[in-house]
Amino acid sequence: MWLELHDSNGPIFINMDTVTHFHRVEGKRRTTLVTFAPNNGTCVMFQVNESPDEIMDKISEY
């Protein structure tokens, strides 16, 4: 499932099927998402403006 989220440059599309976890960084207004790439076993981190609650609301819409 792909979600349109936003970073400091605008929209970013995240494949939520590869996200292993996400959390709000304390004291920051950004949420960190960690994705796992099954082909090479690496992790990629994204920071988005949406809160974890907003992300969960978007997921539950599907």
Image (cartoon, helix red, strand yellow):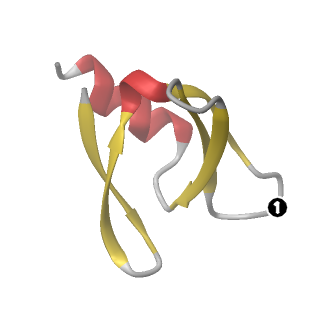
Give the residue at the far left of this rendering: 62
Residue 56, above or below 33: above
User: Which residue occupies 49% across, 62% down?
Assistant: 49
User: Residue at left 54%, top 37%?
Assistant: 52
Q: Taking 34 as reference, is 20 above or below it?
A: above
Q: Is residue 55 above or below residue 31?
A: above
Give the quadrant of the C terminus. top left
Q: Nearer the viewer, residue 25 or 2?
A: 2
Horizontally, residue 9 falls left or right of residue 51, namely: left
| Residue 27 quadrant | bottom right
Question: Amino acid type of disc 1?
Answer: Gly
Q: Which residue is mark 1?
A: 27
- Give percent across and percent down for residue 8: 47, 79
Residue 36 left/right relative to 7: right
Q: Residue at x 62, y 60 (%)?
A: 30
**Residue found at the far bottom of this picture:** 9
What is the quadrant of the N terminus in the image?
top left
Residue 15 percent location from the top left of the image: 34, 36
Q: Position of residue 51 (x, y in %)?
A: 52, 47
